[in-house]
Amino acid sequence: MINQDTINKIMDTARIEEVVGDFVSLKKRGSSLIGNCPFHNEKTPSFNVSVTKGIYKCFGCGKGGDSVHFIMDHEKYSYPEALKYLANKYNIEVEETVQSPQNIEAQNARESLYIVSEYAASYFSNELWTGNDGRAIGLSYFKERGFREDVLKKFQVGYSPDIWDALILSAAGAGHKEEYLEKTGLAIRNDKGKLYDRFRGRVMFPIHNFTGRVIGFGGRTLKTDKNVPKYVNSPESDIYHKSNVLYGLYHAKKAIREFDNCYLVEGYADVLAVHQAGIENVVASSGTSLTTEQIRLIGRFTQNVTILYDGDAAGIKASLRGLDMILEEGLNVKVVSFPDGHDPDSYMHHVGAGAFKKYIEENRRDFILYKATILLKEAGTDPIKRAGIIRDIIESIAKIPDEIKAAVFIRECSSLLQVEERTLLSELSKMRVAKFKKAAGNTPSPQSQSFQQHQNNYQPYEDGPPDNLFESSGPYEAPEPAAPANSDLIQEREIVRLLLAFGHELVNWDGIDNMYIGSFIIQNLTDVVFTDKLCNSIIETYRDEIENGHLPVASQFIKSQDRQIADLAIDLSTSPHILSENWENKHNIYVKDETVNLKSTILGGLFHLKKTKIAGILNDIANEIKTEADPVNVEILLQRFMTMKGVEKEISKHLGITILK
């Protein structure tokens, strides 16, 4: 168990923008940072990070929290695991009473898969550099292909001995259980129940997740036997899902953000070769055909993809298939093709790092020009084939969600294909109509349902819409949850919001000295009963802390281990909108800030809450009067009713409200 002092140190050290920035490309927007949410699919950003508050909030899917919660949500870690991750990131020592692999494995089965995978990566690497066969076979292979030692060590490349149970025996000697070797796919059990190593006699490429932990392997055989598969990859496991992983992303994500571009290659060795050329923003599809999930991973860091695939016919066809998928996700695509017979790996070693980088820069082409050129070359002068190719290219353009980009490509296509732009636009329209009709016949997607709901709720302005009073921190993705219909709940949450926002400020009205607003609010709630469980919990905690001589702050509730409390605190501390600068600068209209007159803000919140509570009491008394048969009791109830009406009138006077009844 991690002691509280260490937890506090981790919490104080972790920077939300740095933690989230490891997984999401963030851009400045007002006082916040925004990016595409990693928890749901979106093409426009609704994910906000507040540096000052140390929290994140997605106004599309509703996810929110602090640095620890982000790691828990993103990596599916437990609370202690997330703390350990942050401690490791910031080099904070965590003292644990139990550290042996056996005991850790016993505590957490999922963590055990990570541990045994890390052990295997270390074992394979050690075999490559110190083992007799590893050096003679594995290391010699890499050196013959021209790979530098620093690149091999960077990617933890290794060698698995050509022995049936070399890893199994080594892992058992280190205290690891066979069941975890089997669950990760490092070992296989045959029909007779005998366990043997999966990756025998292969050079090994460890596959890392976002945070740098080993989750799987790719193994390449060095044998020439055609009956032996060239590559063997780890099977699916609780920690490895190949369709959600990009090989090299852990090492590439910083460079991808820096250069705002991601190079996409096909194989493990291609990634190493491109890195060796000094280009670090490169990833591979990890032994599988490119998937939508992998494209969305890239989209978190950049909207620009450059495909570097093999120069042979198979490589070209693979690149064309991947192009359409990338386009559908709204990313910009360029392609570099290599001379026939070369892939990125072979071409880099053939011409050298400098010439390789120059070749990429000079031969990068927009996808439409690349695809049209390749397909037209295949078609030759055959008019039927050319017509089919034109439709094929228009189908690709139809997948682009951005209308302006599509129009630009149509114009380029018109010139390249020698077809009138009007004809291409007509064909594009037909395809989009067909696609729309097909989609309309299916169950509406969550996005379309959200849009329809938005449309149904829309009420037009009689004199046209006003100029932008608010600028959204992200385009519309899904409707923000409506405010609670219960008036009590609305006012109770408003009081909690005021406590979190201003509780640490000093009262500066009515001659009150040395009192915090938090204490002032709590003192004025002695006659109020909170009906909402979460609001009441925060109020009671606040009251207890003050009685013990401590003034709570918002971060205390935001970082609460009670996720419901944390979520409520985050919701009340964030807003999907920021005030537009144009409202004041362009129109010279000043919108009053609630901090300008804190007395009005705080008293207004308290009076509105009490007015709501009194309205509830009056309603209850009125119902009692209707059902009471005893005249004496009716008289008592009437007196109570009039007393409460008097209190309501006084509160309304403070609020500037005129009561008509």
Image (cartoon, grey):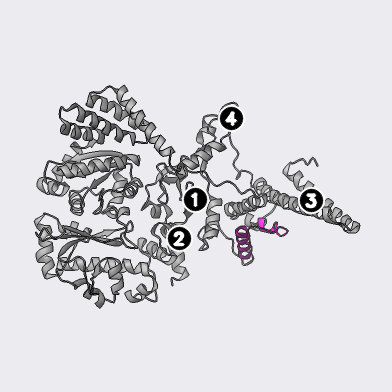
How busy is the neighbourhood of tag 1: few (under 14 within 10 Å), some, or many (20 plus)? some
Task: Establish if 510 lies above or below 203.
Answer: above
Secondary structure beneath label 4: loop
Q: Which residue is mark 2?
A: 12
Q: Nearer the viewer, residue 162 or 250?
A: 162
Residue at x-position 18% and y-position 37%: 363
Q: Which mark is residue 62?
A: 1
Q: Nearer the viewer, residue 570 or 500?
A: 570
Please identify, in this view, whether the residue under mark 3 or under mark 2 is nearer the observer.
3
Q: Are marks 1 and 2 in contact (CB under 8 Å)?
A: no
How busy is the neighbourhood of tag 4: few (under 14 within 10 Å), some, or many (20 plus)? few
Residue at x-position 55% and y-position 56%: 554
Among the two numbered marks 2 and 4 on one chain, the one whose residue lies closer to the N terminus: 2
Q: Which portion, as a residue range, is magenta?
A: 521-545
Among the two numbered marks 4 and 3 on one chain, the one whose residue lies closer to the N terminus: 4
Please identify, in this view, whether the residue under mark 1 or under mark 2 is nearer the observer.
1
Among the two numbered marks 1 and 2 on one chain, the one whose residue lies closer to the N terminus: 2
Can you give x and y, in whole percent of width and height, for residue 235 in the image?
27, 61
Alpha-carbon span between mark 4 and mark 1: 29 Å
How busy is the neighbourhood of tag 3: few (under 14 within 10 Å), some, or many (20 plus)? some
Q: Is residue 294 left or right of residue 160?
A: right
Q: Amino acid at mark 1?
A: Gly
Can you give x and y, in whole percent of width and height, for residue 529 in the image?
70, 59
Q: Amino acid at mark 2?
A: Asp
Residue at x-position 27% and y-position 43%: 322
Alpha-carbon span between mark 3 and mark 1: 39 Å
Q: Is residue 123 left or right of residue 503?
A: left
Q: Are marks 3 and 1 in contact (CB under 8 Å)?
A: no
Q: Nearer the viewer, residue 595 or 4?
A: 4
Can you give x and y, in whole percent of width and height, for residue 102 in the image?
33, 76
Q: Which residue is mark 3?
A: 647
Q: Amino acid at mark 4?
A: Tyr
